[in-house]
Amino acid sequence: MATKCTNCPLRHRELFTEMSKEDVGFMERFKVGEMVIDPGTPILMEGSNSPQLYTALHGMGLRQKTLSTGQRQVLNFVFPGDFVGLQAGVLGEMSHSVEATTRMTLCVFDRSEFWNFFKHNPERAFDVTWLAAVEERLLGESLTTVGQRTALEATAWAFVRIYQRADALGMVRNQSLRFPFKQRDLADALGLSLVHMNKTLKRLRDRQLANWSDGLLHIADLKKLAEIGNFDVEAPAKRPLF
């Protein structure tokens, strides 16, 4: 049975802005159902023109782009609460793919109603625009990390970002969180070789700053990691939930 927006387990998480009763009711009308998918299942394919948009309700995934050589670039990680498919909703097709890493539950929205959504609810339409702007800013930060941070700095930066996001979603217990990705995924996201990634993780582990093994990420010293990553520790900005 699909989860009603009034009972959404994400609504009251620290990460998300409060929704009015009117907004919740509007989202319930916009939502057409839910979909449960297994790990490795594509959600959206590069070049596709999907009739649906999604919000990740449970589980985690990857956004990635594949080159003609078969190489890939991981763009970012999908967390619960992420809105997926906005690019196809606005531009008509996806320029990257989205794939489930764990078993995922997705809220499903009808893309054909997207423009009516903008027309009849301008405040929520602005929220969509805000999300797009934030994604652009984060992409800029990621590009800076790939181009200018050392492997140690980049990994520290990524771990702090991941930890903060998970903590705001209530996913952290005893400074640890489930991070069910492969070393190759993080290496691809940061522009590192797998060997370099492995050596960098060992350096962080040996310095007792962070440990990532068997899908569990433990952060022992968040402040020190932020110092290594050359940025200030700040709580993630509250974001709209769709």
Image (cartoon, grey):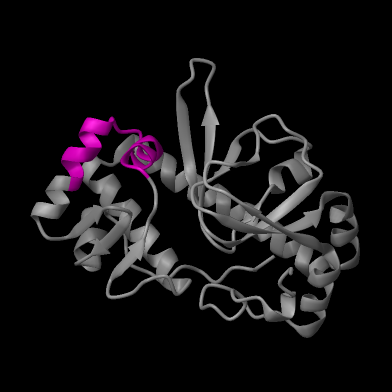
Outermost residue to the left: 206
- Left or right for 170, reference 35: left
Q: Where on the picture, by quarter, is residue 93?
A: top right
Q: Which residues are magenta?
A: 182-201
Nearest the viewer among 10 and 131 is: 10
Taking the magenta stretch, the answer to whether it contains residue 192 is: yes
For the point 53% across and 26% down, the residue is: 66
Q: At which x and y percent is residue 104?
A: 57, 56
- Image point 77% across, 77% down: which residue? 24
Residue 170 sits inside the magenta stretch: no
In the picture, measured across the screen, residue 205 lies left or right of residue 60, that is left
Left or right: where 70 falls relative to 42 = left
Secondary structure mostly taken by the magenta-highlighted segment of the chain? helix
Can you tell which quarter of the image residue 6 is in? bottom right
- Residue drawn at x 52%, y 51% is 137
Q: Quadrant of residue 58?
A: bottom right
Q: Is residue 38 shown left or right of residue 107? A: left
Q: Is residue 207 above or below residue 29?
A: above
Name the quadrant of the C terminus: bottom right
Q: Is residue 141 above or below residue 120?
A: above
Residue at x 76% of width, y 67% of height: 124
The residue furthest top is: 69
| Foreground pick, 103 / 31 | 103
The x, y position of residue 2, in whole percent, is 74, 68
* Position in image of residue 87 (x %, y %): 70, 43
